[in-house]
Amino acid sequence: MDTAEHIDEFESLFRKSEREHFVYKDQRLSSISLVTDQSAASGEDWKEDVKSFLSATARELHWTTLDQNSYSNVQDLLQKISNSRENIIVTWRNLGEEQLLPQHSLGVYVDVLTQVTDCPVLLLPGSAANPTPLNKQGCKNIMVATDHLAGDHRLVNMAIRVADSDAQIRLCHVEDDRVFERYVDAISKIPAINTDEARTTILEQLQKDAREYIDSVIEQTKASHPQLSVEGVVTQGHRVQAYKQLVELHNPDLLILNTNDGDQLAMHGIAYSLSIEIQNVPLLLL
Amino acid sequence: MSSSIASLLLLAETHLEPADFPMWITYLFTAILVAMIGTLAIEEKIHAKKSIIVGTYAGLCLVLATILGTALGIEILPFGEIELPDGHHVSIPVYIPGVDWGVITIILGASLFVEVTSRSGIFTWMAIKLTKKTSGDPWKLLISYGVLTVLFSAMLNNVTAMIIIGSLTSVSLTKLNRRDLLLGFLLVEGLLTNVGGLLTLISSVPNIIVGKAAGIEFVKFFLVASPYVVVSTIATLFMAKWRFGIKGFDNDIARDHARELVNSFDENESIPSKTFFWTAVAILVLFVLALAGQTSLPWGLDQLGMGFVALFFAGVMLLAYKHEVNKFYSAVDWDLLAFFTGLFAVINVMEHTHVLDLIGQGIAALLTLPQATASALLLSSSAIASSVTDNIPLAAMLAKILASPSMNTPGDSPFWWCVIFGSNLGGNITPIGSASTVVAMTIIHRQKLDMSFMGFVAAAVPFAIMQIGLAILYVELAF
């Protein structure tokens, strides 16, 4: 073993010793804006439904409704939202695109809102043209889905913030087996690396990071929110299918996803796919 | 070393005296020796390992000495049988008796022992535990890493110490978002490995070679070296604090944030088994005690030597991995061991061609000066020579010269310590001066930090001057 290999060995050992602990931070929410392409009266009806749904936070929020007469295009809506400095935007897929059928996208309004503004977007079930009624019993069963759970404090903190006091939060981490297999295939062509050993150790390490993070979330929430129940699911598979199966299995009231992928302008790939595939569950896009 | 000297003295009776020996042969081999040292100085540039360089010169020396001896009808190399202590005669190759197998076994045993012991996680555990104790405060981190570098250099070897502490420094300062301090930390750690390498008889190869030649025992070595190591470490740390502007926290927010970050390290992560961990701790303590008391071992066990102690404890640790010992054998620095074997063969030829006598005459002239001046000159010239080439050939040659019958340097002479201090501390002047500064530069470049050869010299020379100055003062005061 030469010096560079030795240095790398010890750097790996020390990096392996690093734990990504969950850091609880109270997500301050003060205002919420419901954006609809319907009339003001229809917006008011939906406002009451959303208040029931977000019962843990709704009472303390300042509500505004932007109906079909409040904006004329995306730029106009963005301007209004940035002026009012909202904390959460509530809206539907394919806003203002009633005439565009079939609808296999989120629509230009949601695309821009999730990427240009910093505030979370609560996407209500169905689409603007065909909205699905909301569960008015509140957020008792929340699922947080990500392909990089460790260190994603914002997702977990938001889940805690919107959850009912006795809710169950399920943290889900799925390693994409297609991406993983592509790397293993490359490794299998490198004689210096033992393929079986690499497959096992890399997968173990990837899942270990997520598991340890979930453990630290459980430990923290036991102290700060003892009535909340937190559990984790760490698995491997085709990500969209795996998350769809998890949603079908656990039937969450709310699914929380990360949409910002570094400095990319487009929405994070997995979040976009899930937002289109899973239309019957409210999605909170961060 | 003493056995090889004895056998050489035995054979010296059949040799020509230096006065009758053709001087041009001595000059020719002196030129070869200079060329070898010069080649070692540029080993990084020519991308050749030490063992290959020295092995090539060893082969050249042996072939040339044999051909010249045959052609001129003189016996340059002592071919023939050698006599064992029990009176038996054995025939072994001419280049074998010149190798100091005591040194080779110490290095082999100690490196195997360290390799297996480090698998217990003990060293990484210590390093992470100490990191957490500092709460991420930069000044406390520098002190902790500095002290740990010195201790690891003393307990392990300076290369392993630099690898462990340098790796942790890179990871922890990155975690703390203080990469601006990384260059200063790595540089100081590199410099402290050579200070820590002075602490015990087995901490560095020059210590082993010179200590063995002078007959300095483990405990005596530690007692003489430790006051200097303590003072020099403290001085180096304060100088680094000033030079690199390393300060402690001055507000609670920064302190709390850093504490939170370093607390995310888990010191138990690298411990594969608690049982193995505590076994390794116990055996490490026993190993140090056995080395310290080696000359007082009962039932004649002291005669087995320090190399046997190192090999014995390495064997005990290997029992924990008895099915996968190959992994540890492959981790041994065979280049270093082959380098030593070749080096001893070269020095043996140099002795028979009277090159060492020639150098010895120069050193003898130096040593006739008043002791204080002679010590200062010997120490500083050893340091300068060690800064541009490997310190091991220098230490091996000077040890052989000081131990030669013509010099007959007593074991309590300060000159031995001048060679020890000079050859170790000289490694701090340039990045190629010692193996651990080479490692420090490797980590610096891996971390994409900007540090050239001359940049290192400019940053390190003030530290080296201070450390060498302290060493000269210490030798003057202590002897």
Image (tube, coloured by chain):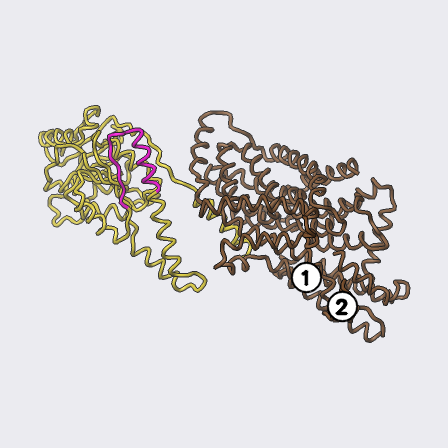
Chain colours: A yellow, B brown
Task: Locate residue B5: give its quadrant.
Answer: bottom right
B351 left or right of A143 in image? right
- Contact flag, marks 2 and 1 (Cβ < 8 Å): no
Question: Mark 1 = which residue?
Answer: B341
Query: Residue at the spot x=49%, y=42% of the render?
Result: B125
> Measured along the vertical axis of the image, is residue B162 above or below residue B325?
above
Residue positioned most to the front: B299
Question: Mark 2 = which residue?
Answer: B88
Q: Tag 2, which chain?
A: B
Q: Secondary structure at mark 1?
A: helix
Q: Nearer the viewer, residue A127 or B267?
A: B267
- Residue B310 in magenta stretch: no
Residue B160 point in image, percent of width and height? 57, 49
Disc nearest the viewer among 2 and 1: 2
The amino acid marked with disc number 1 is Thr
Which segment is the magenta one? A212-233
Query: Residue at the spot x=13%, y=42% of the render?
Result: A126
Q: Nearer the viewer, residue B71 or B304?
A: B304
Residue B276 point in image, percent of width and height? 48, 47
Query: Residue at the spot x=44%, y=64% of the render?
Result: A191
> Measured along the vertical axis of the image, is residue A30 above or below residue B159?
above
The amino acid marked with disc number 2 is His
B340 left or right of A178 in image? right
Q: Tag 1, which chain?
A: B
Residue B30 shows up from this direction: no
Q: Secondary structure at mark 2?
A: loop
- Residue A215 in magenta stretch: yes
Query: Residue at the spot x=38%, y=63% of the render?
Result: A188
Q: Nearer the viewer, residue B230 or A241?
A: B230
Label 2 to label 1: alpha-carbon separation? 25 Å
